[in-house]
Image (cartoon, rainbow, N blue to C red):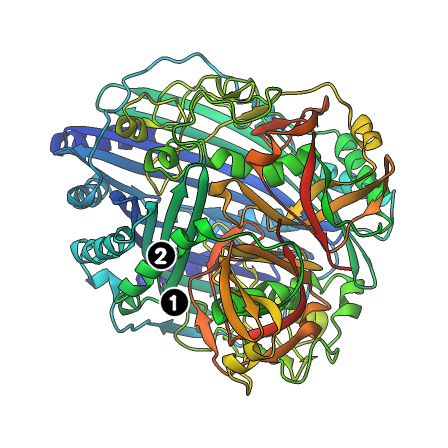
Amino acid sequence: MAAADLRLDEVLDKATKVAQQAEVFHLSGWNEPVMFEANRLKILERRDSSGIALRLIKDGRIGFSSTTHWNGADTLVENALETVPFGPEAMMEFSDRREFTPVPVYDPAVEAHPLEGMMRLGQALIDGVRSGESELLCDASISRDVSTITLLNSRGGYARYTKSVFSAYIGGTLIKGTDMLFLGEGKTSCQPITDPSSLVDAVLTQLEYGRDIASPASGEMAVVFTPRGVSGALLAPLMAGFNGKSVLQGSSPLVEKLGERLLDKRFSLWDDPSLAMIPGSRMCDDEGVPAERMPLIDKGVISNFLYDLQTAGQAGTKSTGNSHRGLNSLPSPGVSVSLVSEGDTSFEEMISDIKDGIVVERLLGAGQSNILGGDFNANVLLGYRIEKGRITGRLKNTVINGNVYTVLKNFQALGNDATWMGGSLKTPSIYCTNVSVATRD
Amino acid sequence: MNDNLRDLITDALKGHDAQYIELRVDENESTHIRYRGRELEEVNRTTSGGGCVRALAGGGWGFVSFNSLENLKEKVKAALRNARLVGGEPVTLAPVAPVVIKVHREVKKDPSKISLQDKKALLDQYVEEIWSVPGISSSSVGYGDAYRKRVFASSEGSYIEQEKLDVILRLNAIAREGSEVQQAGVSLGSAGDFSEMEGLHQQAKQVAQRAVELLKAPQVKGGEYTVVLEPVLAGVFIHEAFGHLSEADHVYEDERMKEIMVLGKRFGGKHLNVVDGAAVPGLRGSYAYDDEGVPSTRSYLIKEGVLVGRLHSRETAAKMGEPPTGNARAIGPQFPPIVRMTNTYIEGGDATAEEIIADVKDGLYVGNWYGGMTSMEQFTFSAGEASVIRNGRIEELRRPVLLTGNLFTTLESLDAVANDLSMNQGGGCGKGGQSPLPVSNGSPHIRIQRCLIGGS
């Protein structure tokens, strides 16, 4: 780290000599995926990477450059300077914060965990799901990732934190003739995952519900989105409208809707990056602004939009600590950790309440439509038919279509089964009515 | 990169007890320009690079990637250690002759020779074209160009240096009325020729007009339709509905898939011919050698409706006893190569586009695209626009639709192929976490019977 730190100071020094303000963003880390294919271990990988990005404010404009290829501070500064005359007008200054309320997202046990343990977990996942069906062909990946973000700027702002992420995924395909059943479940944590049982159980449940093909479903009907279904179908079109840039530019359906009740009053949604040991959490955002819990939808009322420094400056408001960036581009606002309010209805109660409907678990092609307008439109990769209060099998050749603002204005129930989906979303099942479903026989 | 690097790499590959080792090093330079609304939101210059080693020993693969090229020999050893930990049944690689070569890319108008000022001036004009249309509430315009030099070296004696250029442009217009938001866009790309990004003023304006028109357009009712696909969307269709299925890594270790995908099986009518090949020159998926050092080819996947070929890496080709096709590609040094498409297209037929539309009494004409996905059984692709076909004529506009189908049966329902093949260069492909990989796809107008469409 020491040599890298000297480089960061050197870049900041040189940049500050030629610009009014400067900010250096450094990302370094490694990850180790253990990949299983066709029921067996296939490849062990290790990736090491690091890079530096430089942002300048000079004569009121923003310049930017980045590199993973250290050619000296001068090249980085020159490249950034070259973009200044064309850069956007700066409507911000960098943050001078140096102290933050700690948010634990690093567990040294991830680094200390033996590679053999990861290999064993992968094999246990495959053996576990194949115990339910020996003809399943499985892929699995077990991966760990440790990364450090360092941020410093000419206003004295400074932040550094390290995050560990451990993830496990198991997928299986069952082929009969040309019919294929796709099963899969994953888990992500800041701490090592050692127990295969919850993932295996989830896949075996999918297998039980989905083994037989049910009668086709068509028309407007009741749809239960499982937490995975909410994640696949509803979250992206819902969050698109909260991006401060879309609001500012007038492309969000939520423009001028702040404070209005647009959704059912049981529906609330928070961004909460302060939860300990959650992969999407962080003590500050990617511009060194503290990241804090904030309601986006409070009892159906649109309450906040997501801002980074520049977008907030343009909109005449304050950054909400929602800046996200990769190495190669300027920051932009986005949600960190989404939490959807829980209800009191169990999944079983939802099913038994439905005469004619479907369960949506996994989707294909979601997000490839007009999500900015709130639309969702996708093929149901894994979903089940509900008839007379019972799950009667798996859907085939089925598409769903709807709009999140319509669906969440009048839904039937929120589940009491809130579950983490990956490292940045916790949601219950949502029981909706009047979603359009079409099937090809 | 110079002879010094060659010595370092050659030396790092020497003296190991391994079945096979390959080492790649990339150097990239790219420029991105992005507008949101009329504001220029971002201009950046990026340099990146790094390398990787993939090793095969004792039946297992090991892989390491890195930014720094120091201690290359240690990195080779680390990849070998990983490979030995994996172990397993012996792996055979299809033989290829070692090659030592430098491949240069010449383009008509090299984007790296055009000033940032001139690039911006052109984009400013497109932004103004979009905003000249009344009713536009926002827009986004993104431009990117990239130059890459990649070295591939193997323990079998290959040393291949290849240059690659890539340019992309996306024009998107957004119209809003109250809380109704509609958008329309177009994506273009080129294998490094900036002149293909010029003169698109009319297209920019049409995109904006389309976004505004969509606000008034009704939704399509979900169900089965006879659809005619315009070439750009038909290219996305063949990529999703068949291309991925022809990638041998989905087949080579799966006995059931091998039965389904046996060569000689009929997939469609005699009018259907599908080709993939990086040896088709001048496109975004074109190259001379793949990332295992295998020369590129041009292969029929479907000939007269019958499955005749598939896309291979050296491992999948050997396992299936078929010739390698040069389709192993990695998006960058962070990843090992996997089987990918290159330039995939349906060959032109005899009919004109007008003729295949004229036969449709009641159907949909769909074009432009948001994207597509495949699961190996089902596929989806999203049209950016749809219009009703009534009694052989294209009539009113409808909202964007999602089309879906089954990979094994939909090609049978493809009943007409027009003669107006056109390549779509604006897309990127994602697989195994490697996205977006430059590819192209193409097709003439095609017609599909009983295609399932998601709608209200």
The residue at the point 54 percent across, 82 percent down is B355
How many other residues sit within 10 Å of disc 1, few (<14), some (14-19) or many (≥20)? Answer: many
- Along the viewing direction, whichever of A213 and A357 lies nearer the viewer: A357
Name the residue located 42 percent from the left edge and 73 percent from the top edge: B100
Closer to the camera: disc 2 or disc 1? Answer: 2
Q: Where does residue A198 sit, x and y in percent of width and height?
A: 76, 30
Q: Mark 1 lies on which chain?
A: B
Quadrant of the image containing the N terminus of chain B: bottom left
Task: Identify the image quadrant of residue A60.
Answer: top left
Say which residue appears at 56% left-offset and 50% top-offset.
B63
Q: Residue at x 70, y 74 (%)?
A: B412
- Furthest-front residue in view? B391
Residue B220 on image: x %, y %: 59, 55
| A187 to the left or right of A348 | left
* Residue for badge 2: B209
Residue B310: in sight, yes or no?
yes
Which residue position holds label 1? Answer: B161
The one nearer the camera, A13 or B382, is B382
Kind of element beneath mark 1 = strand
Q: Is residue B2 above or below residue A140?
A: below
Q: Mark 2 lies on which chain?
A: B
The amino acid on which the numbered mark 2 sits, given as a three-letter code, is Gln
The percent position of residue B345, horizontal first and vertical second, equals 53, 74
Co-location on one chain, circles 2 and 1: yes
The image quarter containing residue A92 is top left
Q: Nearer the viewer, residue A65 or A440?
A: A440
